[in-house]
């Protein structure tokens, strides 16, 4: 069983940070008809947990987003998780074929301010998951884009994930994506993103950041996970 934990992080400007090429940037406006359809279906904020996309995905791969830029949808929902491999922070090799349990995958980066805000929530989530023998937690640290893969761009003021953990006072295993290959394979359009993957490797759920959600987002997420597991 692979049990990896991770917290989030980063310092950059709020408007320039957490999606593939230019931060968590807003997508171009939809057509008037599409906007009208979306307004009748989509909530004001895209911070909730989803098990299916609320509307059909666009042919061009673009995502519908809330006013802040968070996506309402995720391309791999209901699909098999792509096979990915990578190097862990401790130098060991990670292979997604080893994920045989229910698994939460947290995709984040130290360059991302929204990930930094989610840090305390992710720490609480990882502790809770560690108490559940039927659920694992995997964290993947990704660059913002293929053009921003230098240590200065990836780790910002911390210089490394190890230094970040040292400052925060905790440390968990983490997969390092050095060139956005993992980010691209997982079709991540926002960080932080949280995926729920079943034991047979199917992406069963998605949500974005905890810090912008109301209520008790970690407890709510764990309840959502329990519901999906029960339905399965």
Image: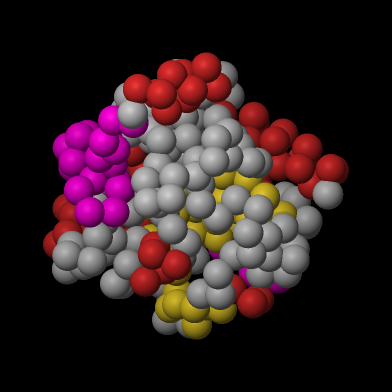
Position of 94 relative to 136 (above/below): below
Look at 75% across and 66% down and name the residue there.
200
Q: In which quarter of the image is residue 36?
A: top left
Q: Where is residue 189 in the image (x, y as percent from the top left)?
A: 38, 49
Q: Which residue is rendered at x = 83% and y = 49% of the image?
A: 232
Q: Looking at the picture, does residue 58 appear above or below residue 6? A: above
Q: Is residue 163 above or below residue 178?
A: above
Q: Quadrant of the N terminus?
A: bottom right
Which residue is farthest front?
33
Left or right: where 91 falls relative to 19: right
Closer to the camera in the image, 57 or 86: 57
Q: Can residue 150 be seen from the camera position used here? A: yes
Q: Is residue 231 left or right of residue 149?
A: right
The residue lying at 51 percent from left, 74 percent from top is 84
Residue at screen point 32% across, 67% down: 180
- Relative to 152, does residue 117 appear above or below in the rendering? above
- In the image, residue 120 lies at what x, y percent? 45, 38
Task: Return the residue nearer the eye: 73 or 159.
Answer: 73
Colouring mode (rainbow / by chain / secondary structure / one colour): secondary structure
Q: Give how far across and how far down residue 140 sits, in percent.
A: 44, 62
Nearer-the-camera pick, 122 or 77: 77
Q: How many labels does the image show?
A: 0
Q: Does the magenta stretch include residue 77?
A: no
| Range drawn in magenta | 1-30
Q: Main secondary structure of the magenta part?
A: loop
């Amino acid at each position: 069983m692979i049990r990896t934990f991770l917290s989030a992080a980063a310092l950059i400007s709020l408007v320039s940070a957490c999606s593939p090429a230019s931060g968590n940037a807003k997508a171009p406006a939809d057509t008037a008809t599409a906007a009208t359809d979306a307004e009748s279906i989509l909530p004001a904020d895209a911070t909730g947990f989803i098990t299916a996309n609320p509307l059909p995905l666009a042919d061009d791969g673009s995502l519908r987003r809330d006013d802040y830029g968070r996506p309402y949808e995720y391309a791999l929902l209901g699909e098999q998780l792509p096979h990915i491999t990578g190097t862990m922070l401790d130098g060991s090799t990670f292979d997604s074929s080893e994920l045989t349990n229910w698994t939460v995958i947290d995709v984040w980066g130290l360059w991302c301010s929204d990930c930094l805000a989610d840090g305390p929530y992710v720490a609480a989530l990882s502790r809770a998951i560690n108490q559940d023998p039927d659920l694992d937690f995997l964290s993947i640290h990704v660059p913002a884009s293929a053009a921003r893969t230098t240590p200065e761009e990836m780790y910002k003021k911390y210089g490394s994930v190890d230094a970040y953990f040292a400052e925060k006072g905790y440390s968990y295993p983490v997969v390092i994506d050095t060139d956005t290959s993992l980010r691209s394979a997982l079709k991540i359009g926002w960080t932080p993103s949280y995926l729920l993957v079943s034991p047979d490797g199917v992406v069963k759920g998605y949500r974005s950041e905890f810090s912008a959600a109301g209520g008790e987002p970690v407890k709510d997420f764990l309840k959502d996970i329990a519901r999906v597991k029960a339905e399965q």
